[in-house]
Every structure is written in C-alpha cells, then in structure tokens.
Image: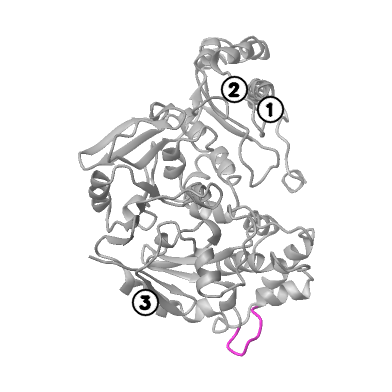
Amino acid sequence: MNESIRFILNGEDIALANVGPTETLLDFLRMKRRLTGTKEGCAEGDCGACTVLVGRLADGKLAYESVNACIRFMGSLHATHVVTVEHLAGRDGALHPVQQALVDCHGSQCGFCTPGFVMSLYGLWLTKEKPGRREIEKALQGNLCRCTGYEPIVKAAEQVSLQRPSALFDPLQRTRSEIVARLWAMQASGTIRIASGEDRLIVPGSVQALAEVLSQEPEATIVAGATDVGLWVTKQMRRLSPVVFINHLSELQLVTESDDGVTIGAGVSYSRAFEAISGKIPALGRLIDRIGGEQVRNMGTIGGNIANGSPIGDSPPPLIALGATLTLRSLEGQRRMPLEDFFIAYGKQDRRPGEFVESVFVPYPKVASRFAAYKITKRRDEDITAVLGAFLLMLDEAETITDIRIAFGGMAATPKRAPTVEAALIGKPWTEATIEAARPAFDTDFQPLTDWRATAEYRQLTAKNLLTRFYLETVGAPAELKRFEEVA
C-alpha cells in the first residue's frame, strides 16, 4: 500500500506521508515551505493572488496550467510539478522576461497581486508565442488588481511576447525532459491511503479502484477540481473525511468524438472541454469561457459541476437543452439516464450509494436547429450565475416550431426544463406574437426565490426576456451586445 503523496516542488522532490485531506497547497507553500511569494487574497479562487502552475503528464506529454493554490488540496498533487514564482529567476538571479516586462511597463503598484499576475502571464508565455489582446485578457480573467487599471499589465504581456531569450534561460523549458522522467517515476500503480486520526484521504489508482473505494466508503467526498468543495473548507470551515481524489485518473479524462456528439469524461476540465466543444457548439464554448477565470477553468470539471447538483451550476442547463445523457458507474456496472432526470430536488441527485459520475454524452445540435445559452450575472466575467437560460429550437420549412427544449438554472431548486412554455410554443409559428403569448407560461413552470444575486421578480422577468432575446437573435435582430473588437 502506498502511503505518501509525491510531487515536485520547483526543483525538489517532495514526499508527504502526513497530510490532511483538506490541506491546501497555499497553506503548505506559505506555512511549511516559507514560499511567501504566493499570496492569500480571497481564499475562494476569485482574486488570483495565489496563482501557481501545476504540470501534469497527459498523453505522455507534460502540460502546465495556472491554478488557484488557495482551493487546491494537497491530495490532488500526486505525480505533478508545482511551480511557484520563486522558481522563475535565472541562475544568476536575473528576472524572468515576464517579471522584467512588468517592471518595464510599470505593471505593479502595491505589489500584492503581482506574483499571481506573473504566474498567469508565465503560463500564457509558455503556451502562446504571440498572444493577441483577447488571449491575454482571457489568461488574466482570474486575476484581480485594485491599483493598475490592468492596461500596464496587458502591455507587459504584449511586450514579453516580442522578445524571447534562449530556451535554456527558462527553468521549465530547460528541465522539461528531466521533469517528465521524474514524474513518470512517481506514477502510482496502486491506491494511496493516508490517515491521521479521523482524517483520511484516498487517491485511487484506477477507475476500478475508485469503484471499490466508494463501495466501502459510500459517504466519502469525491474531489476532482475542488472549485466548489474548496470553499466548503476555506469559507465554511467544514471538516471532510474521507476525501477521494480523482483528478489524476486518465480514464475519466477521455474526450471521445463521434458523428452524433462528444462524450466527456467526468474528470475533463472546463479548459479541455472548451477545446472539444467550442468548434461544434460555439454557444456552449462562449459560455464555458465565462465560467470563473482561467485558473478555475483549468481545475473545475464538467462532471463535478453536474455531480454537485447546484441549481446555479453553469453546465447543466445547456446540456439538458441539448439532450445530454449521463453515465454513472459503480461496482455493479454502468447506469445511463437523461441528464435532466439526475436532478431530483435541492441537494439531492439520483446517485446511488457507491456510484459516481463517469461521463456525459453531449449530442451535437442538428444542422437546421438553433441553439443559444445566456448567462446573466452582475459582472460579465468570473461571476456566479443569477439566471442561466438555454434554448434548442427546430423549425420546419414553414417556420413552424416542431420541437423546442428550454432549460434554466437559478430559477428552481434544481436545473429544470420549462415544459409549460415548451408546450405553448410547439406547433405554433415562430413569430413575435407566439413568443408574447408564451411568456406567461413561465409563471407556471418557475417560482424563483430572492437572494443576494437577484430578486424573484427579476429572475422571472429575465427568463421571459431571454426567450424574447432568443427569438430576436434567430430572426437576425442585433439583440446581443458585442465587445468593441468583435464589431470594429
């Protein structure tokens, strides 16, 4: 039995045999390793001050991603390479080009958020040779600064892409083959179990081992990206035990495309899902781009968003509208169901003891269909949904509605279809008069609540207006606000 978590921290091999199931990477770095360049700002994955890079072997290749150390649990780091801002300087202490560009462009004032910006820009620098303005802004979605106004930071990102020194200067490019070999040697063949009193963490060695663990520990908390579970610990101070980590399981990270659709494994991150989906279902790709910041999208998973069952989860409404099918797995085998049937009541899903979400199949919309997903928030990027509506429409040659699927989040205790609205539309001509006549049916389908994100009245009116917006967009009206560079 393996009894330690092993990973590389900057250049040092680490083996931890005494680590709690909810110990965060941020606390480990600052309190146990005194690597204080990584800052704690929000402790909920919002501000990016704690950004580090985590490298992992995928398909035999080493890939680095920016993540939030404040909500990244240590149990998820086995066989990874953790890189902090302290690792970037040259052998002679010279600043990395990303750091130097921030100095040259005056991209730092108080300096508290600066290391996080450095690491996000470094992750972009590693993957994009000459990123455009939009790619830079996307990479910085998860980093907040109260001083600079961001323009100097964006200029620094543009500057550093123009001058690239020899690859031997960069610590990750210089040691890539060595790190790959060391990570291969760390791969666990069996299940890792670490216990300290009542605290236990488990890292299954395979999906079959995961099924065996959950058959013995049906009440265990399953953690993939921890973008929500992390807040249970950092904000609600909840003790979780046992915790089962699954983000390393390659069997749950498969993306399989067919002529009809794409099957997404439960461990596939939002970032990888975007790559698989955005070309075939652009509206869903645009929605994924608004889920958290880059760090959250690198950690969070479609499967975790579904399994969590939140009524304001971003992925279930559009997937329900598309007719997605969920696959659950346990020692007894697989079980499939329409995704909409998985959500029973608030905090209750159709998941039997010992079962876990294995994958979701997302059908591609038919060529003649129209699909849209709208996320309503207080700010456009990196914000939690108040209302999310998704629509899939089929018309015949006479512009009569032959089928329509409408699903909403934020309007009920679960992600939910709008059957009364759908029934009021099917068989009718796709006209403004039809839309106006169907709007009152929302009052039958939904009785939303009031909270700090929106009032019940606002949610109800917004849902009706989104149907109208969908209609206007399908007939060519300029209903959606565009960013300047999209219309210039």
Q: Is residue 121 left or right of residue 214?
A: right
For marks 3 and 1 on the same chain, the one whose residue lies earlier in the sequence: 3
The residue under the point 26% across, 60% down is: 191
Q: Amino acid at mark 1?
A: Gly
Residue 385 x %, y %: 61, 37
Q: Is residue 457 left or right of residue 53?
A: right
Question: In this orientation, does residue 44 appear?
Answer: yes
Residue 249 sits in quarter: bottom left
Residue 165 x %, y %: 62, 81
For marks 2 and 3 on the same chain, the one whose residue lies earlier in the sequence: 3
- Element assignment for label 1: loop
Residue 81 x %, y %: 45, 70
Location of mark 3 (residue):
182
Region in magenta: 90-96
Residue 357 sits in quarter: top left
The residue under the point 51% across, 76% down is: 172
Q: Is residue 94 within the magenta segment?
A: yes
Q: Nearer the viewer, residue 39 or 184?
A: 39
For marks 2 and 1 on the same chain, the one whose residue lies earlier in the sequence: 2
| Neighbours of disc 2 within 10 Å: few (<14), some (14-19), many (20+) | some
Location of mark 1 (residue):
476
Q: Nearer the viewer, mark 2 or mark 1?
A: 2
Find the distance from the CA under tag 2 to the CA under tag 1: 31 Å
Q: Nearer the viewer, mark 3 or mark 1?
A: 3
Residue 17 x %, y %: 34, 69
Q: Amino acid at mark 2?
A: Pro
